[in-house]
Image (cartoon, rainbow, N blue to C red):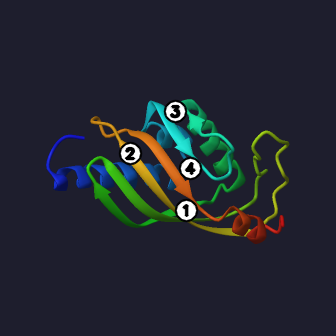
Amino acid sequence: MDGSAADVAASCRRVLEEQLAAVNAHDADRHSTYYAEAAVLHDPEYSAPLRGQEAIRRDMRKFLTAFPDVVGELHQMLTSGGTAAVEITMTGTNTGPIGVPGGTPLPATGRRLRLPYAAFIRFDDAGRITEERRYFDVAGISHQLGLA
């Protein structure tokens, strides 16, 4: 991303707020448009990164199926160049099947989830996400949903 530090920060914030609005509207297709075609997403639930906009779209569809009432809130964001560090909380009720990497989906638990997480996100010059590294407590999710 070219421009002043303030312009870059504003652009990063705009993209992340619009992307979070897509999640809150339960629109996986719109959510994925904020990623570059060859984006890489590192998520603690997966042994290997998700690669490409389509893989990220499928992952968000699974999440929205499992938590159709999910709401995300951006708490804070710090930027440096074309990289943002964010803190977000997602909350929702598990009323749909839970997709598991490489396995049979688990049945809905009917339990509420509060998922605080942090991410480091890199942007290209066009303002699309090229890489995202998410950090959250996978064991805590299992406990909240009664799976552990």
Q: Position of residue 117 (x, y in %)?
A: 54, 63
Q: Check contact, mark 1 vs mark 3: CB within 8 A.
A: no
Q: Position of residue 143 (x, y in %)?
A: 77, 70
In this rendering, is residue 48 above or below 109? above
Kindly identify the residue that appears in the image at 83 percent across and 64 percent down. 147
Of residues 52 and 96, the one drawn nearer to the viewer in this rendering: 52
Q: Earlier in the sequence, mark 2 or mark 3?
A: 3
Whole-Å distance between the Cαs marked 1 and 2? 23 Å
Q: Check contact, mark 1 vs mark 2: CB within 8 A.
A: no
Reading the image, the residue beneath label 3 is 53
Q: Residue furthest front?
A: 47
Q: Which mark is residue 122?
A: 2
Q: Is residue 12 left or right of residue 32?
A: left
Whole-Å distance between the Cαs marked 1 and 4? 9 Å
Q: Which mark is residue 26?
A: 4
Whole-Å distance between the Cαs marked 1 and 3? 22 Å
Q: Earlier in the sequence, mark 1 or mark 2?
A: 1
Tell which tag, 1 or 3, sits nearer the viewer.
3
Kindly identify the residue that appears in the image at 47 percent across and 49 percent down. 22
Q: Earlier in the sequence, mark 1 or mark 4?
A: 4
In this rendering, is residue 111 above or below 9? below
